[in-house]
Structure formats: structure tokens, C-alpha cells
Image: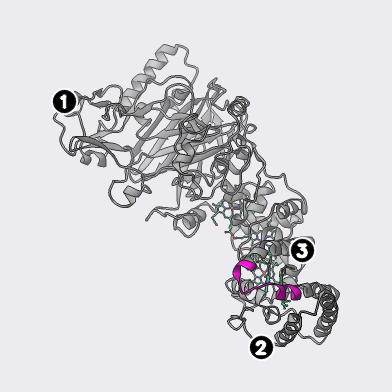
Amino acid sequence: MNKTRTLTTLIGALLASGSAVATDLQSVDWSSIPSTELTLFYPGQSSYEWIVNEKHGPGATETRAGKTCLDCHAEEEADIGNLIVSGEKLEPTPIPGKAGSLKVKVQAAFDQEYLYLKAVWAAREAGQYHDYIVYRDGKWEKTGSHRVSGKVAAGVEPPIYEDRFTVMLGDGRGVPEFNQVGCWATCHNDMRFMPDHPDKEAVETHPVLGKGGLKKHDIRKYLLNSRTASDRTGGWNNTKSREEIASLRNSGGFLDLWQWRAHRSNPVGMADDGFVAEYRLFDAGKKMFSDNWDKQTNQPRYMFDPAGNGGKPHLTTADLKQATPGFYLGDTNKVAYDPGYAWKNGDVLVRRVVTGKVEGSAGDNNDVHGSHAGGKWTLVWKRKLDTGNAADDVAMKPGQSYPIGLAVHDDHVTARFHYVSFPMKLGLGNGEGEINAVEIK
Amino acid sequence: MPSRSNDPAKKEGRGRALWRALHDFFEKPLNGLLAGVVVAAVLSLSFVVAEELNVRASSTEFCISCHSMGAYVYEEFKQSKHYNTASGVRPQCGDCHVSKRFWPAVWDHIMGTEDLIGEYSHDWSRPEVFEEKRPAMAEKVRMQMLNNDSKNCRECHVWEAVQPKRKRGQRAHKAAIEEGKTCIACHYNLVHKKVPLSDTFKQAVDQYGKPGKGLSSGVAQTGDS
């Protein structure tokens, strides 16, 4: 159903556009495009602060001197991941049985207008569900979370968290440290699941990040250029003024961040489009997912249309084991929640709603398709080189190179419990990169 | 007066007997700064004599005869890779801390007499007394090593002959030899408890040898806090 949908959208788009300059994503001949096999590894709590300070030993000296990670660590990715995932170093909460690294096969191509990416990686499970809500004694309760959450670790909730594939991209100038230390430029000791995370109240009362500002409750990725000072714990609370932060962004001082999500974006053939600046934020406009929850009534907003769901408005916990056709609430299979329905204990609804009706810059990754088969995810991606949204997207040009980092969230994890790449370059037709996109006509 | 009987490294060595006598002497209130200076001078001389007589004033035994040295840094050293080596080569304190050549060694020992005064003017049995001083001491040692191109390290290690097991070491050494870097720039926190790097030391390291491009950073790190 997913495929037919995509196809119809594509045909529609082609008919509508009339002059089809760009290649249809589904017809890219990947067999003629060179591939790179990357080893992404588990980074634990190796923050920027860890990298440039004494615990990194010679690595800190040489990072300060301007060397890049691969100058020392090329081909050591698997060893690093194995060491950290074991809990011996940089990981106070190891996940039993988790592998230390993950191989990802990447291919890239471009034409004058678009970038095309393909990535293949092994994933035992598809991970196409996200958290959900269960009916119990007259109430809907949120349940299911990532492996490291307290309730999952204690066996009270099941581990349910979508798989993700993330691209972080710089323009090479706006955030100079990204060229050298890659994603570590965004990772700090005071972010969530890191050693110095501030408590919720401190974040909520912060003038720029809290209730009077971005309305955040925890600290996520941010760039040091948005802070006036930092130390070994990071610099979360030393934000520059709103004006300074805004002007930084207007002058390109941010990183582009795109996340393909197996539950929250893949069903509509998309990936989200965000960026990292003073926080990890979404681009302007309307993104593809939102919460299936009405804060006023404390009830879900939507339920499944019984007509397309075997006559029932809900799922059962058994459905969550595999992606059944109605595994997400989308544009065509949802109806308004009916509190009058004879809800029974154990009835399940998903906690997110996904829509193809995106708007603005937030919807720029609107041709992204992952399929899970044979224990593998195969992801294909098409995106405008230059979306025209300079305030939250990096604009690419053929012939140039761009600093890039990749990450995969596999097996019900979130935040830092992912596999990541060292900083790399994406070359568009110049052969300069670790990942080299070739030109297609 | 702190009891030194629980000194883990207790060994009634020549050095120690000498210090005990001196300690009694210093406890008498009449002996002021002047006496200290005179004694220091005399001691320096006796250090030289000791060296000449091949009494190992650089030996671990000698160094740890003082509580300040024996209770902390020695215990840490025993956990390090320099204490438990595959080859059984076990550096003495002085191998890293005292110059090999004669006159510099004499100088080190003269400077060391300052420690003698230090030994008896503090209650080293209290770990917090040592910990309070540790950062400054580590800094001094690091700067010394940086300024003399880690010459003591090189007495044992021939850099070109070091064969790091892992790729990171092989690559780092290859580049660092070409760039004229020095051991302590990378191999700090070597055998004792870890001490954070000071900004001063970091800057000195960053300027040592052929300076690199420097850390590309969107903001100046305030560093230590």
C-alpha cells in the first residue's frame, strides 16, 4: 500500500510539473553508482567536552592542534564502539547485547537540481512502531519507550521506539568546528543522558530555552557559537541574546539535520527537516508528524477508521510486534476519536499522527522511502540541492564539498544511544569526499 | 604530629634515617629561616656527595622515604603501566623526575631541598593537604618536561623505535615526529592520579613544535571549571 501510494504521488508530481528535468527517485540506476561502506559506531558519552579535554589523552592534544578524528581513528570505528558499548568506558548505562558498530553502505548522486542518496544497513527488526497508548480502566495511558528509559529497563514498559537514519550537514563555513570534529560539535556534557544534564526546572525557567522562550524541558544538541561561554560541563545556560542567535542563523551559523523516521515520517514517504543552532529545532512550516493527544480532554485526537482496519478503531498489543497495514495513523485511515465506542482494557492506539500535508521548509525531505526486507533497511532519498530556505537549510552546489555526519538509531533507542560516523566530507562530483556523489543526467 | 608508622612504603633506608634526624632538629623552635637555608646548602652538598658515592638519591626508595611522596604518588605509580611492565623494566621515581646528567642532577637535588622544608611544614598524612597542592605540583612537572623536550622520557624511549600497537598511535607518532612535538604534550596523566590540564599548559603545548591549524571552534572555551 505504501508503494502504490508513493507511485501515485510521483506520477502526480510528474504530470503536474510538466517539464521533468530531474530523475525520478525510483528509476535511479544505483548499480552504476559507486558505494562506500561506512562503519558507524556507538559513541557513548564522548561529548565535545570529552574530546578536547584530558580524558581523551593524546586525542585532546591533537584535536586542539587541528587534526581530524580520522587522522588517528580511521578503521578503528568497530574497536571504539565495542569498547564503549561494553560499559568499560564512557557508558554508565550499557544496553545488554547491543552491538558496538553498524556497517552502512552509502551511495550518492546528484544532478543540477537534486541530491540522491541510498543507504543500506542491517536491522533485525523493522522498528516501525513508536510509543503508543493503551486503554486501561477508563483511561488512556502512554506506554512503550526506548531501551534506556527507567520503565523499560525495569520491565514495566516494552521497548518500542522507531528506527531512524540521520544526516547532519554543514556548509563548510558557518560552523567551522563541524568540519573538524563533526557531530561532536553538537554534543555536550549537559545534554539529556549526559553526565551534567540540568534538572527540568532549571531548563523550564531559562529565559531563552524555557517557558518564556523555546518551551523546552531538557537540553538537546546545540552549537557553542550560540553560547557566551562553556566549560567541561558544556554551556547550556550561557545562551547569547535572541538577537545574536537570530543573526548567527541568518549568517549561516547552523547545521542542517534531516531525520528519516520509520514510524513518524516513512509512512508518508518523507524525512523530517530540522537544524541545530541554539537547540535542535525543526525548520519553519509544518512537519509530517504530531501527537495523537488532546491535552484538553486527555484523550486521543484520532482513532483508526474501522472500515480500513478490520472493523475495529484500534490495534492490539500483538499488532505491535510487526508492521501491520494500519501501523500508523495517516491521512486516509484516521477518523476523529469516538469516546462513546465500547473501549476495552488492552485496546491500543498509536500516539502519533502522520500526514503528507507538510508545509514550508519543514517539508523539504518529501521524497524519502525506506523499505525493510531480509533483515535490512534500504533507504532512498531525494532532496533539492538548494531548497531556497536559507534560514534553516544548507544550500549545496554541484562541484563543491560539504562536511557531513551520519547516524542510525537501531533497536528501540533514542538520543545518544545511536551509531554515528566520524566527520566526513560529501563531494558533489569532485571526488574529494569520503562519500562521493556522482553526477547523473 | 602525624604518625608515619602506617606509611605503606616504610623502609628504614639511609635517606629516611637522615630525614628523621633532621625532622627532630627542625621541630626545635629556635631554628628559623636562616638555619633552614644553611641546612639546605649543606644538604645540597651532601646530595652531591651522595650521588658521587652512588647512593641513589634518585631511587624510589629515597623519594618515598617522605610521607608526602610515599603515601600518594607512589601508590598511584604502583597501579600504572610503568610499574607493571612486560619486560620487568621498572622506572625509579628519579628516572622520570631527576636529570640523568651530573650537574643538572645536582641542580635538581638542590631544588629538591625545598621539598625537605615542605615535608615538615605540612601535615601530609591528610590527603586533602596533598590534593590541594597536587594541581600546582603536576603543573610544575609538566612544564618542566615540556621545557626540556621530555628528556627523561627519551633516556629510556627512543621515539623512532616506539611501535604503538594501535593505528591511532602509529599515525600520531608519525605526524608528531615530523612536527617536532614532545612526549608530555600527549602523554600526561601518565602514572599518577589524573589531574586536569590547566589553560597555561594547554597553551604551551599548543605552541610547542610546529603549531597545527588549531581547533576550529565557534567559541573560545573558558576551559577550567
Q: Residues within 10 Å of mark 2 (few under 14, many from 20)?
A: few
- On the same chain, marks 3 and 2? The answer is yes
- Left or right, A346 with reference to A276: left
- Left or right, A179 with reference to A78: right
The residue tagged 1 is: A340
Question: CA gap, disc 3 to disc 2?
Answer: 31 Å
Q: Which residues are magenta?
A: B115-129
Q: Residues within 10 Å of mark 1 (few under 14, many from 20)?
A: few
- Label 1 lies in what chain? A
The residue tagged 3 is: B144
- Left or right, B159 with reference to A222: right
Q: Amino acid at mark 1?
A: Gly
- Label 2 lies in what chain? B
Q: Residues within 10 Å of mark 3 (few under 14, many from 20)?
A: some
Relative to A12, residue A261 above or below? below
Relative to A409, residue B63 above or below? below
Which numbered mark, 3 or 1, is in the foreground of this view? 1
The residue tagged 2 is: B12
Q: Amino acid at mark 2?
A: Glu
Does B15 appear in magenta?
Answer: no
Which numbered mark, 3 or 2, is in the foreground of this view? 2
